[in-house]
Amino acid sequence: MAMVTCPKCTKQTAQGGFPAWEIIVAICFFPLGLLALLAGRKPTTCQHCGNTWQA
């Protein structure tokens, strides 16, 4: 998992990802599934301050 810096507290946190079922559906319905996959990404939540943002 990629690490990103929180814009609020500037500490490192893990970047939000995709559920496994969304990846499987994206592969099955290629290329439209890839667009749906990008729209359904989980937001990133900082483990230190709780700030949530789209990273």
Image (tube, rainbow, N blue to C red):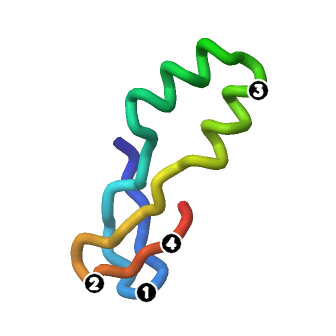
For the point 45% across and 40% down, which residue is it? Answer: 18
Of marks 2 and 3, which one's residue comes earlier in the chain? Answer: 3
Say what amino acid the circle numbered 1 marks: Lys
Dot 3: element: helix
Question: Which residue carries the number 1 mark?
Answer: 8
Tell me where residue 11 appears, x and y as whole percent: 32, 75
Count residues near mark 2 (Cα–Cα under 10 Å), then give few for <14, some for 14-19, many for 20+.
Answer: few
Say what amino acid the circle numbered 4 marks: Trp
Count residues near mark 1 (Cα–Cα under 10 Å), then give few for <14, some for 14-19, many for 20+.
Answer: few
**Alpha-carbon span between mark 1 and mark 2:** 8 Å
Image depth: mark 4 or mark 3 in front: 3
Dot 4: element: strand
Of marks 4 and 3, which one's residue comes earlier in the chain? Answer: 3
15 sits left or right of 48 in the view: right
Question: Which residue carries the number 3 mark?
Answer: 32
On residue 53, the disc is 4
Query: Marks 3 and 4: in contact by CB < 8 Å?
Result: no
For the point 55% across and 22% down, which residue is it? Answer: 25
Of marks 3 and 1, which one's residue comes earlier in the chain? Answer: 1
Of marks 1 and 2, which one's residue comes earlier in the chain? Answer: 1
49 sits left or right of 29 in the view: left
For the point 67% across and 38% down, which residue is it? Answer: 36
How many numbered marks appear? Answer: 4
For the point 53% across and 49% down, which residue is it? Answer: 41
**Alpha-carbon span between mark 2 and mark 3:** 36 Å
Say what amino acid the circle numbered 2 marks: Cys
Dot 2: element: loop
Image depth: mark 3 or mark 1 in front: 3
Tell me where residue 50 appears, x and y as whole percent: 30, 80
Count residues near mark 3 (Cα–Cα under 10 Å), then give few for <14, some for 14-19, many for 20+.
Answer: few
